[in-house]
Structure formats: structure tokens, C-alpha cells
């Protein structure tokens, strides 16, 4: 059995960035622990200062990794050394339908605060390189 993985992002606004990735991946917010109505209630009960509150999102089907968003005081300063590929066209039967699925998802993400950087056409396929609202690069394929 494979070892599980969580993807962690540094964030200026963890909650806002988590909301973006819910939309980008069709994820849902990670539910709070039993006995708590929210993660804020959990953090308060454990004496965590508000500026240290985190956010997390999960795949509702349990297949993809959990994404965790941690608050940091500094902004992003360089290109990512790792990025996510968002497979918006997965399952589309032909190239025209795959491009249409990518274009539709890209527009949704731009409306949610992402930035479209460029299109990449390679022998391995087509993608749109983007940045999330805090400048983290990712690709939509």
C-alpha cells in the first residue's frame, strides 16, 4: 500500500486560498473534529491565536490528497519548485473536447481570482499555466 501525502501551502490568507482550491479541484472544506462546530471553535478551545488559524480542504471521494493552508507573514518570492496539475479535461474523448473543458475551467478559476499566464503546446499535450490568488503556479490540463 502506498504512503499517503498531504500538500501544504504557505498562505497570507489560508481561508481565502482554501476556498479557491475548493473551486479549482471540486474539493470540500475539511470538516472540524467531532465535538466542534468549526475549525475556529477548535482553534479557540486550544488557545490558538487567530493569526495562526489554518484551513484545509479534502477530496469528498477520498482519492486525492488533503490540502493544508498555513499562515505565514511573508509573501511568495520565487517560482514554485513543485506545482499541481489540475486535470479538468480528464475523460474527455477527443482533443477538441479536452481543450473546451480546459478553457471552461480556466475561465472559472480566473473569475475566482487566478491569473492565466500562458498556454503550453507540447508533444506531450496541452495545458494552461496559471497562478492561484497568492501567486502559486499550477497547470490546467
Image (cartoon, rainbow, N blue to C red):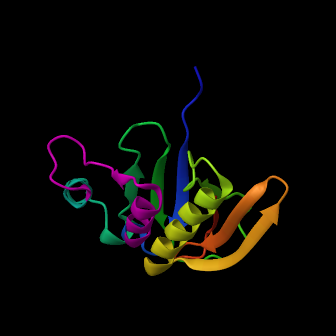
Residue occupying the point 58% across, 80% down: 115
Residue occupying the point 47% across, 62% down: 24
The spot of residue 22 in percent (x, y) is 40, 60
> Viewer-proximal residue, 94 or 84?
94
> Viewer-proximal residue, 80 or 41?
80
The spot of residue 3 in percent (x, y) is 58, 29
Residue 105 on the magenta span: no
Residue 75 visible in this rendered orientation of the protein? no
Q: Which residue of the protein is positioned furthest toward the top in this rendering?
A: 1
Where is residue 100, by image quadrant?
A: bottom right
Where is residue 85, by image quadrant?
A: bottom right
On the rendered structure, is 14 left or right of 43?
right
Is 74 located above or below residue 46 in the figure?
below
Residue occupying the point 57% across, 54% down: 89
> What's drawn in magenta, residue-wise?
16-39
Residue occupying the point 39% across, 72% down: 16
Amino acid at each position: 500500500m502506498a504512503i499517503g501525502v498531504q500538500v501544504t501551502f504557505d498562505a497570507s490568507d489560508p481561508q481565502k486560498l482554501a476556498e479557491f482550491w475548493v473551486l479549482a479541484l471540486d474539493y470540500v472544506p475539511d470538516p472540524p473534529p467531532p465535538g466542534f462546530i468549526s475549525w475556529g471553535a477548535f482553534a479557540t478551545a486550544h488557545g490558538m491565536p487567530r493569526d495562526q488559524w489554518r484551513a484545509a480542504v479534502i477530496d469528498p471521494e477520498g482519492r486525492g490528497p488533503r490540502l493544508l493552508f498555513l499562515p505565514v507573514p511573508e509573501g511568495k518570492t520565487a517560482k514554485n519548485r513543485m506545482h499541481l496539475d489540475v486535470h479538468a479535461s480528464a475523460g474527455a474523448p477527443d482533443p477538441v473536447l479536452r481543450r473546451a473543458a480546459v478553457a471552461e475551467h480556466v475561465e472559472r478559476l480566473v473569475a475566482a481570482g487566478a491569473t492565466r499566464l500562458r498556454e503550453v503546446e507540447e508533444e506531450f499535450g496541452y495545458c494552461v499555466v496559471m497562478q492561484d490568488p497568492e501567486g502559486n503556479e499550477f497547470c490546467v490540463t
